[in-house]
Image (tube, rainbow, N blue to C red):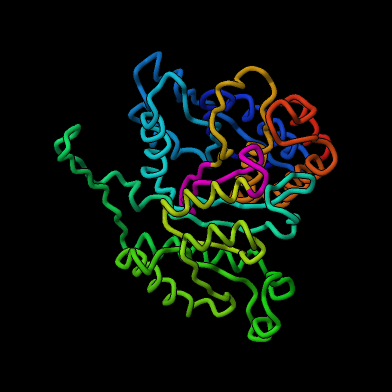
Amino acid sequence: MKNYKIAVIPGDGTGPEVIAEALKVLDAAGKKFGFALDKTTFKWGGENYLATGEILPDDAVATLKKFDSVLLGAIGHPKVKPGILEKGILLRLRFELDQYINLRPVKLFPGVETPLANKKPEDIDYVVVRENTGGVYTGMGGSVQSGTPDEVAVQNWVYTRKQVDRCLKFAFELALKRHTAANPWRGLSEEDRKAGKTAQLTLVGKTNVLTYVCGMWERAFNEMAKQYPAVKTAYCHVDATTMWMVKNPEWFDVLVTENLMGDIITDLGAMTQGGMGIASGGNLNPEGVSMFEPIGGSAPKYTGLGVINPLAAVGAGAMMLEYLGEKEAAAAIEKAIAFVTGNKLKSMAAGKMGYSTSEVGDLVVRAL
């Protein structure tokens, strides 16, 4: 039996509650599909910071590199100033573990209400590949004469060609993996199919104004496209992308973009798929240790009430299994989630599901 070493960071607020349900489902999947998870819990987060003054131990990154994967709850504490934990834990781990891909599936499950009129599950099913270690989030910049009328603030938007190329390569490969010649992307025209296209990859940028950085992304994208003739390519300005995500989400298959733009459009995507209670994501280092998490925050007002929706965390667990190579188990969990949303839950909202947090986890296990 294969045994995977998993680092678990339950985090703050309702994080431990949803992670408990994700682990319950993962253990059930392991029994069904013949693998085991060797789990080690790290209590890093707001409570630890308030008690010790330490955000992360010095050896945190070295410690996590010894694991096969990381499952994260949520980071954020009402008694800790915003930015301290996010930069000190989330960004530090992403950067130092070189998790250069943020992967965000935008998928509408059966029975889940979307704010988009007349859109069905087959209309909202795409993936956003967000570059995760560059851009303005690197922290380069500064300010002078703070608090005066002459204050100057600069935040540098920096990318290397290497960062751009490796992100684009991942996106092109993902577009191919999502489809085969026998099962091409639904949005391709007959002309595309005859030309041998099986997938579509859309670059999101702002080349008409941000000409230097976005211009480099576009050049790299067009150059790499020559290596992937089966992928139909498209380009969309980021502002237009937000419009089409609302009006015609069925136009998208795989989208690739830089860090800040990706951060913004993926939260819009989460709302269209039913909210933060169902949205999952992964911070990937394809050559190293990756970290998977529910997208919603720590939701401190619901802590300990047993009413928070755990399905985003369960979905994050399924993503983790897929990237560990347990694809059959991952698909089974996703199918079980779809059964629960389509047949059991009254709502995705906390306290309105018709079941408690742990009961939802039990429903997924039974469906599995």
Residue at the image position 37 percent from the left and 15 percent from the top: 52
Residue at the image position 64 percent from the left and 29 percent from the top: 18
Residue at the image position 83 percent from the left and 39 percent from the top: 367
Looking at the image, the residue that sits furthest to the right is 343
> Does residue 103 appear in the picture of this structure?
yes
Q: Left or right of 218: which side holds 269?
A: right
Where 195 sits versus 267, above or below? below
Q: Left or right of 67: which side holds 352?
A: right
- Confirm whether the magenta stretch covers residue 76: no
Q: Position of residue 66 (x, y in %)?
A: 46, 38
Q: Position of residue 287 (x, y in %)?
A: 46, 53
Q: Of residues 33 and 17, which is closer to you in this image?
A: 17
Q: Of residues 242 and 140, which is closer to you in this image?
A: 242
**What is the quadrant of residue 81 in the picture?**
top left
Q: Quadrant of the C terminus?
A: top right
**How many tags in the picture?**
0
Q: Position of residue 105 (x, y in %)?
A: 61, 52
Q: Of residues 228 and 237, which is closer to you in this image?
A: 237
